[in-house]
């Protein structure tokens, strides 16, 4: 059976929309990539207009045969600088200046809009524990992982959803990937700060009931966790998603404690233990402990 270890999916037959896709691509790339794209586009446009000025001519102050003078004149025109040392003196040069002015207005508006859109986007910094633990809790096998807000702000009315994806075969022999929502002990938190442990009791109604590490691997079990809420600083919605593979499920272990009470009565949250786990005891109903 084919493995789904990779997030890459080969899509065939999808319609391509270059302009829309370019806009979303510019919103997703790193800041250094966006700056590089803007600078490269600005220089490329000026090179094109410099070639036009060199062919048309009629720019006073430009030394014949020196493309760099035409390039510098183009930069001054597109940047609305105009030192006065170089200026158009023919109808052809004036026409190119008009065209470059229009292009400059459009380019500046697009660049400013994209930069503003990126600054105004509220990007969450929700972190997920690297592994999912399955261990007994009050005698019931329970799936648990940890999420937290890596910012100093708080996410209000945070809602978490967890879905299980596994490979199944129908009675007709058709293989398909079934997605099932997991019922959580608590799926809503009024305020998500540094740490929140998400719990799913593996009761007889759970799709994980009766499964083992071997069956999870054979059925290519995956978990997809999503978090949505409102950032209390920007008052904008934030969301995050994380994917766990069968190899990320640790049977017979629990999440290590990150909270402890100090001698003065205050609580201490040790985020250094965010991904730490501890072994659990074996029980008759759960034989995977230490």
Image (cartoon, grey):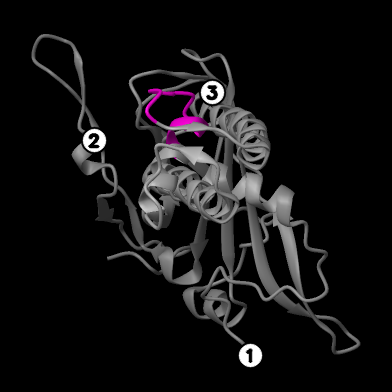
Q: Which residue does the numbered mark 1 point to in the structure image? A: 1
Q: Position of residue 254 (x, y in %)?
A: 34, 51
SS label for mark 2: helix
Membership of 115 in magenta stretch: no
Q: Which quadrant holds residue 165?
A: bottom right
Looking at the figure, which quarter contains the N terminus? bottom right
| Cα distance between the residues tagged 1 and 2 | 39 Å
Q: Which residue is mark 2?
A: 271
Question: Could you tell whether 241 is left or right of 84 in the image?
Answer: right
Give SS at disc 1.
loop
Looking at the rendering, the stretch of residues picked out in magenta corresponds to 75-85
Q: Is residue 269 above or below residue 177?
A: above
Q: Is residue 105 above or below residue 103?
A: above
Q: Which residue is mark 3?
A: 120
SS category of the residue bearing label 3: helix
Where, quadrant-wise, is the C terminus in this rendering? bottom left
Task: Report the magenta stretch's main SS.
Answer: loop
Residue 81 among those drawn in magenta? yes
Q: In the depicted view, which residue is nearer to us: 53 or 89? A: 89
Q: Residue at x 68, y 37 (%)?
A: 91
In percent of width and height, residue 65 lies at 40, 58
Residue nearer the viewer, 28 or 116 = 116
Q: CA distance from mark 3 to mark 2?
A: 29 Å
> Of label 1 and label 2, which has the lower sequence position?
1
User: Is 150 positioned to the left or the right of 155 in the image?
Assistant: left
Side of 238 relative to 249 (left or right): right
**Mark 1 Cα-neighbour bin, 10 Å: few <14, some 14–19, many ≥20:** few
């Amino acid at each position: 059976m084919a493995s789904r270890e990779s997030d890459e999916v080969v899509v065939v037959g999808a319609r391509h929309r270059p302009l829309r896709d370019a806009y979303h691509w510019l919103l997703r790339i790193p800041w250094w990539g966006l700056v590089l794209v803007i600078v490269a586009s600005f220089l490329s446009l000026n090179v094109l207009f410099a070639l036009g000025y060199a062919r048309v001519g009629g720019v006073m102050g430009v030394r014949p045969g020196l493309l760099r003078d035409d390039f510098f004149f183009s930069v001054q025109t597109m940047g609305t600088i105009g030192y006065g040392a170089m200026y158009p003196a023919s109808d052809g040069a004036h026409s190119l200046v008009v065209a470059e002015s229009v292009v400059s207005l459009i380019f500046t508006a697009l660049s400013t809009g994209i930069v503003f859109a990126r600054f105004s986007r509220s990007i969450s910094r929700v972190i997920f524990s690297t592994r999912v633990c399955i261990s007994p809790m009050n005698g019931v096998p329970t799936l648990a992982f940890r999420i937290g807000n890596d910012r100093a702000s708080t996410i209000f009315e945070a809602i978490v959803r967890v879905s299980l994806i596994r490979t199944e075969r129908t009675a007709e022999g058709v293989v398909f990937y079934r997605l099932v929502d997991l019922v959580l002990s608590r799926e809503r938190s009024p305020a998500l700060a540094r740490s929140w442990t998400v719990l799913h009791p593996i009761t007889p109604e759970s799709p994980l009931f009766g499964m083992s590490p071997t069956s999870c691997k054979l059925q290519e079990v995956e978990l997809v966790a999503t978090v949505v809420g409102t950032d209390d600083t920007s008052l904008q919605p934030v969301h995050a998603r994380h994917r766990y593979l069968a190899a990320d499920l640790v049977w017979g272990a629990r999440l290590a404690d990150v909270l402890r009470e100090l001698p003065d009565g205050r609580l201490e949250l040790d985020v250094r233990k965010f991904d730490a786990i501890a072994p659990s005891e074996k029980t008759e109903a759960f034989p995977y402990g230490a």
